Image: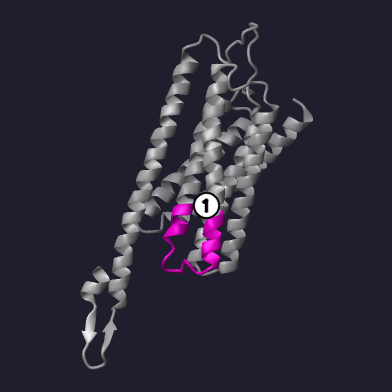
Amino acid sequence: MDVAATLEKTFAFIGAIVVLLTALYQFKNEMKTSWRLDNILTRLLLGLLVLGCVLVILATVGVIGHGAA
Amino acid sequence: MAVLSTSALNANHGVIEVRYDDVDRAYSVQRDLRLLGFALFLLSDIVLFSMFIFAYLYLRNSVPLWPPVNSLGHQLPRFDLAFATMNSVVLFGSGVTMHFALEAWKRVERSAFFAWLFATIVLGVCFLLGQAYEYHSIAITWAGSTMGATFFTLTGMHGLHVFVGVVYLAILGIQASRGVYTPAKYFGLTAGTLYWHFVDVIWVALFFLFYLM
């Protein structure tokens, strides 16, 4: 793997962990709000954002994607 | 209408009294209807993306080898996963900054709201620049293969949504600075946040389909 790809993956890994933790915090706070449509949609979309972060983390460590072992 | 019907003419003072709870109720009904309309708009966008995604999956499964081979018999290269992960994090990060912006508005922290909104716009523009760089550096073309056609169509359509989102957020920022929204009435900001989260989530699907499958 070349240096640029390693740097990109390192940045992505650290960034994805930060975004994941922040999104989980926001999701937890959002769960305290009422069950209105906008809150429900926000919870759903934040949950899927968390999933996206997990996918990025797994891809950067080579568990999934074409770089997977 | 709800406001007018519950307003009362005060005969003694000759003024129209409008009860604040009636105003709030009228706004609440209007807000819920707008929200429903916006949710239906997002649903229609999901249908649009779903059609293209199913077309991509159909085309992908109709060839024996993926990435497919070109006219010279060489297998096309895979997309750059490392760069895509970095660009994805930029977009996902903009999702959380937009959420912080809305929360700051609810807490009446105007300067924090504008800072988070600006960060969201900057990250959105960075994502678009990243997409442009990937388009420029990629070894496939739109017309060269089904892989290229589906990739450019889907990611291009998503990029158009991001671009529209960036413009939309900039307009929301201008409106907020001009006092269009209050800490109690801010439907436009809620819609903007939902739209931006939606754009993020569509990218989760595209990232999985093009870079991980």
Q: Position of residue B51 (x, y in %)?
A: 41, 28
Q: Position of residue B86 (x, y in %)?
A: 65, 38
Q: Mark 1 packing: few (<14 Cα in 10 Å), some, or many (20+)?
A: some
* Colour scheme employed for the rendering of this structure: one colour
**With B97 as the anchor, is A4 left or right in this view?**
right
Q: Position of residue B191 (x, y in %)?
A: 44, 53
Q: Position of residue B147 (x, y in %)?
A: 56, 19
In this picture, which residue range is highlighted in magenta?
A: B170-192
**Residue appearing at x 23%, y 93% in the figure:** B12
**Residue appearing at x 63%, y 27% in the figure:** A62
Residue B175 among magenta residues: yes
Q: Where the C terminus of chain B falls, by quadrant?
A: top right
**With A5 as the anchor, is B203 left or right in this view?**
left
Q: Is residue B93 above or below residue B145?
A: below
Q: Is residue A69 above or below residue B74?
A: below
Q: Nearer the viewer, residue B132 or A18?
A: B132
Q: Nearer the viewer, residue B157 or B118?
A: B157
Q: In this orientation, does residue A36 appear?
A: no
Q: Quadrant of residue B145?
A: top right
**Residue appearing at x 52%, y 34% in the figure:** B157
**Residue appearing at x 52%, y 58% in the figure:** B172
**With A3 as the anchor, is A68 left or right in this view?**
left
Farthest-out residue, front: B14
Farthest-out residue, top: B73
Question: Disc 1 designates what residue?
Answer: B168
